[in-house]
Amino acid sequence: MENSEKLKEIVKEKYSEIAKQDKASNQASCCGSGSVSTEVYNIMTDDYTEMQGYNQDADLGLGCGLPTQFAQIKTGDTVIDLGSGAGNDCFIARHEAGETGKVIGIDFTPEMIKKARLNAEKLRFNNVEFREGDIENMPVSDDVADVVVSNCVLNLVPEKQNVIKEIFRVLKPGGHFSISDIVLSGELPKKLQEDAEMYAGCVSGAIQKDDYMEMIVKTGFENISIQKEKPIELPEDILSKYLNEDEVRAFKLGETGIFSVTVFAQKPGGTSKKIKVSLKDLQENACLPGSGCC
């Protein structure tokens, strides 16, 4: 499609625009990118409104899961949110970590950082900060975080393995992550793969589920589990922007699947109990012993 730096510029430009859009528009499109569907109101996002710490101004409707619901955040924890947007997951994480905890949101879109900081100021949170930076090279020291969360962001990064390695670096020994993201089973039609809006819309930048899980295994994480998985259905009125009628029908009847997965994994060390896991285990088990998800 494009080289890594060009893709990053496409995403930064698009998410600068998305920062100014309303939640309804973002939910009815693919992560706020491209056409708004009139068939489906909510394509990817889960409902945050019942979660404690939720702030309406910070919810842009851009996620594909509820990672903070599964993240096992404790009072006093330091939490890092990758691709923090307007601050939604950060504020929920802050509720869990309490006044003695610390939350760091990282985003490389200046408009998102500005919006998140304004929201934090309104809420008078002095233990939530937002740092502008690339999650492939986080502006954070080694062994800082107890927990890392992220919601529908890794699919936007060209070099995903670099992000997984960075997560490993910034986590304390025994720390863990809970990340929601889009993955694939089967190949997308070429017209979707090559479209920039579909990349910024969290679809064409997604990789195969097995490859995604294997990256986590190879980086050295343990106690890996899929905490939640749900299929994502692209409505016909969005597909028809890229595919003709026959291609839409073939895609919908084909074997390609688009999924939101929330994955838990732990960095070795600390007081964690090591459980060896292979890619085969991950393919056969939605939850593994010791993951806390069963």
Image: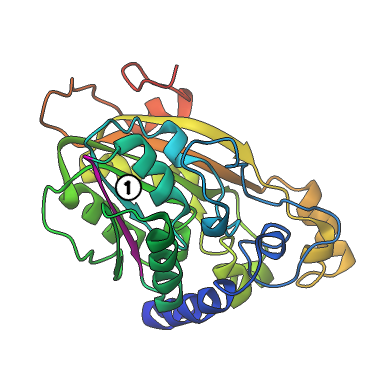
In this view, the residue in front, 87 or 294, is 87
Q: How many marks?
A: 1
Residue at x 38%, y 77% (from the top left corner): 4
Image-based side of 160 in relation to 34, left or right: left
Report the amino acid beneath label 1: Met
Residue 248 image position (x, y, % from top left) = 82, 60
Tell me if residue 129 is in the magenta stretch: no
Regarding residue 195, the answer to whether it shows in the image is no
In this view, the residue in front, 277 or 226, is 226
* Residue 151 sits above or below residue 175 on the image: below
Q: Which residues are magenta?
A: 100-107
* Residue 277 sits above or below residue 149 on the image: above
Residue 217 image position (x, y, % from top left) = 29, 39
When asked about the image quadrant of residue 119, the answer is bottom left
Image-based side of 62 in relation to 111, left or right: right
Image-based side of 160 in relation to 48, left or right: left
In this view, the residue in front, 128 or 9, is 128
Q: Which residue is mark 1?
A: 215
Residue 219 image position (x, y, % from top left) = 23, 46
Quadrant where the C terminus lies?
top left
Residue at x 64%, y 71% (from the top left corner): 21
* Residue 183 sits above or below residue 51 on the image: below
In this view, the residue in front, 94 or 28, is 94
What secondary structure characterizes most of the magenta part? strand
